[in-house]
Amino acid sequence: MSTTPHSVRTTDYHAAGEPFRIVDADLPPIPGDTVSERRATALGPGGTAMDPRPGPLDDLRRLLVQEPRGHAGMYGGFVVPPDDDGAHFGVLFWHKDGYSTACGHGTMALGAWAVDTGRVPAPDDGDAVVRIDVPSGRVTATVHRAGGRTTGVTFRNIPTRISARKVPVATSFGAVEVDLAHSGACYASVAARDLGLDTTKASLPALVRAGQEIRAALAGHPATRHAGDPRLSGVYGVILYEDLPDTDDPDPDPHDADASAGPRQRNVTVFADGQIDRSPCGSGTSARLTLLAADGRLAPGDTLTHESVAGTVFTGRLLPGGITEVTGPAYRTGTHTFLLDPHDDLGTGFLL
């Protein structure tokens, strides 16, 4: 361990079942003037995910994500300074394979954390807006409060851009057509039924394999490149979705009395190297909203009810200008002080 302290404090949340481990202290200096530049530093000397040399935070990331302190599906963030005074703070999102450019469920968790800890003042009843700089831009988390407690969080993402429709991809399950959309990260969407699958727990091994094959097949595809920032290029997640009967509840979002009925889908999002999002995926929901609107299935103000394989739910709406809002729950699961014994032969841990 070259940079990791012998102990590190975290506050853990989950948003619709997906974990998020927050570190806002015990961090080494991270050079860069913006969150995006700090992510490049964290990725390694080359500033790209392909550079094998570790960055200054990598020992700490591995300590927190690997067993026995974490697991392959763990997610988290390092709280860093914002790009300017317009945001409350910035964040570097991390998972077992490195640093992502966006994370909707993490933004929700961070909004709840900022209010719960008093970092951002909030009323006992009403809303508080938390502005967060992430590698893909500035996002907001509107934290809903009632009776002195947080009851939900609405994540407003950067604009989503559709980059390609019906891209043919060959898989071991057969040929499929994939839609690509950039919503802070690049997501590939494919109907699970086109692979002969459904979005149930029993299908998870096959869904993961399909997701890995699709991601590999799209490596280097022009539509996966981000026109404004090459550091945002490449498929991050593959969304394997299934249509469910449309909701007939005229008010599925308790924080939006004007929400109308709309589509209902369940998805399994396979991210990084075969990890499964336990939530319906916040940034991925933004991608689905924009694609559904392009298909004429969702009008501005309509609600998408988005389920995860774990049975949790996000609701999403499309706003003018390609802006999306995703609402869901965020709950604190614990506060921890993780220790690294210098005599422990496992060091920062392992992955299975």
Image (cartoon, rainbow, N blue to C red):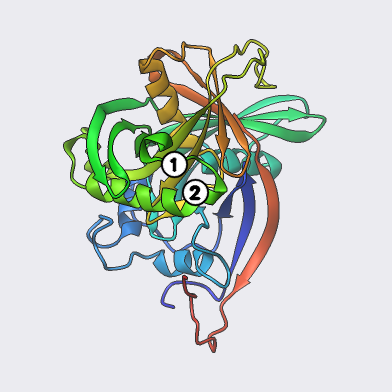
Is residue 19 shown left or right of residue 219? right
Q: Residues within 10 Å of mark 1 (few under 14, many from 20)?
A: some
Q: Is residue 86 above or below residue 196?
A: above
In the rendered image, residue 340, in percent from the top left (x then y), is placed at 56, 78
Q: Nearer the viewer, residue 272 or 347?
A: 272
Q: What residue do we see at 23% from left, 47% from top?
A: 217
Q: Secondary structure at mark 1?
A: loop
**Amino acid identity at mark 1:** Leu
In the rendered image, residue 295, in percent from the top left (x then y), is placed at 37, 16
User: Residue 197 got which mark?
Assistant: 1
Is residue 75 shown left or right of residue 97? right
**Amino acid identity at mark 2:** Ser
User: Residue 121 got which mark?
Assistant: none
Q: Residues within 10 Å of mark 2 (few under 14, many from 20)?
A: some
Q: Is residue 191 above or below residue 201?
A: above
CA gap, disc 2 and disc 1: 7 Å
Q: What residue do we see at 38% from left, 60% from top?
A: 97
Is residue 130 shown left or right of residue 214? right
Mark 2 and mark 1 lie on one chain; the one further toward the N terminus is: 1
In the rendered image, residue 178, in percent from the top left (x then y), is placed at 30, 34
Q: Nearer the viewer, residue 168 or 287?
A: 168
- Contact (CB < 8 A) between labels 2 and 1? yes
Q: Nearer the viewer, residue 7 or 98?
A: 98
The residue pinned by badge 2 equals: 203
Viewer can see residue 85? no
